[in-house]
Image (cartoon, helix red, strand yellow):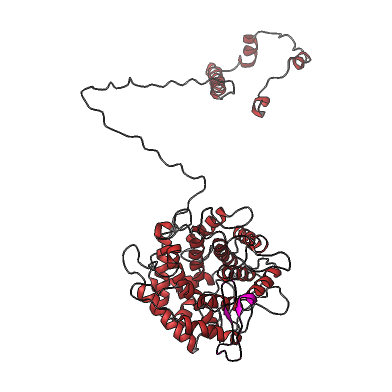
Amino acid sequence: MSKASESGMQAPLEDLDDAPESAPPTAGFLDEVGQKFGGAPWWAISGSFHALLLLMLTLIGMAIIRNSEKDIIVTTSMVKDPIKEDPKIPKPDVKPVKMPVESEEPILQPTIVTHEISEAVEDLVNDQLNVDANDPKGDEGISDADTGRSGFTVCLGSGGGGSNRFGRPDSIGSMKSMASKRGGRETVDSVMLALEWLAKHQEPDGHWDCVKYGGKQADVAVTGLSLLAFLGAGHSEKVGQYKDNVKRAVYWLTSIQGDDGKYYKQGETHGIGYHHAIASLAMAEAAGMGRIAETIKSAQKGVDYSTEKHQQGEGSDKGGWRYGPKESPDLSVSGWFIMSLKSAKVAGLHVNPASFDGAIKFLDKVEEKGNAGDPYGGNRFGYMQPGHATRTTAIGNLCRQFMGWKRDDLRGGIEFFVNQGGVPQWNGNGASVDLYYWYYGTLSVYQLDAPHGDLWKRWNEAMKKALLDNQRKGGDENGSWDPVGAYSEYWGRVGQTALGALCLEVYYRYNLMLK
């Protein structure tokens, strides 16, 4: 019984038995009235009587209107007789349509801002400058991050100056001025067009459909690459015109993350390694930029999977990474894992120091050492054994840069892949395109020689020409790059566009201060 019912109950009968009896009346009702009002005028008596009667009727009406739990409400539905069908009129052929069931989770719709491209980066920088300066950014900067291994530090841009964190304009100025100074205004516009294409072609739930745009089953990897492209231009879950796209990508990657921490969907091509490592790299950078609790939690789980579940070896006997957990490592997969752990360390996440030790031992294993007559002095790398392939040499040298090697100690290896593998070029049919090589090469040459070195000038001019001249103009593909060349059949137009944007973001992606 409800409290309302209890408060409306009458007193128990036994309580009424104990009540004192009332004295019998000594006179009739009319006698008392006569005694009290006998001397009053008739109109006063009449008015008093009618006022009392009106009050009693009002109280009775209120009591009737008040609902009771025991009230029974009867409703009557008045429906007209159904209309009889005329047999002479043919019935329309209507087929039932099954409507999709909406997800319980709210779906965020894409947000596309259409202000002038020339204003986009300036507006983005202004947004970032308005972020609370006291917001925690992690325990170290991108330029001199300590891995936890005694004896050295990890630097990106070794020999440079500042210790700047993700998503912050540095002392050189805004990202706009950095890009314009080092890459030209056209590189900024090209990145913005690429991001606009990616934003328009993101699925409502936050991922990018690789197969839909010419690739294979690689949604996790291309979603990670696309997220990195937005983050690289300074957009985060908190700031930037594409913050909604970032939020949805982060949400989707978190939603498909396994209980053990891996980012992977069953059936994705090339196993777990590439997908998890690229997604983990993106989530680490998202955590470092946005400082959102759920993103940090997911990114840390991803790091723990990388170091404890997937990396070859145990304890102090760790090595590198490959497609599946604990497999004999290769440099292609290991490169993404090393970058993800470096970004995680910068973001303030916990990274097992033994994992960096294992990465270094693996790099030592696949490095081809130079000899007395070697013009490049070593620093060339193979896939699973010592070698000197140009793509793996680019990967190996970037990993060394991430883990603290001095730039001059790596010059020979970088000169080797630039001279032997060549600078970027996009011939008529795109057969010479290799964005996997271009991505690692762009980052490592930039760290070695930017902004004034001859090696960087050669690479930079070739890279800009290849990408700017071949970016699609007009139609639904405006701002994207065609999936042609090495490995493009795996990542399709989405991955090709994300990697192209990442190459052109090299001037400001980590907001470095270089000499």
Where is the N terminus found, in terms of image quarters?
A: top right
From the viewer's perspective, tell me whether residue 208 is left or right of residue 24. left
Residue 430, position in %: x, y?
A: 37, 72
Q: Is residue 95 above or below residue 42?
A: below
Residue that appears at 38% across and 79% down: 465
Residue that appears at 48% across and 56% down: 206
Residue that appears at 38% across and 67% down: 480
In this view, the residue in front, 171 or 380, is 380
Residue 349, position in %: x, y?
A: 66, 66
Residue that appears at 47% across and 75% down: 438
| Corner quadrant of residue 56 | top right
- Give the prevailing secondary structure in the magenta stretch: loop
Residue 185, position in %: x, y?
A: 40, 79
| Residue 169 visible somewhere in the drawing | no
**Span colored in magenta:** 363-385
In this view, the residue in front, 224 or 371, is 371
| Residue 192 visible somewhere in the drawing | yes
Residue 250, position in %: x, y?
A: 54, 59
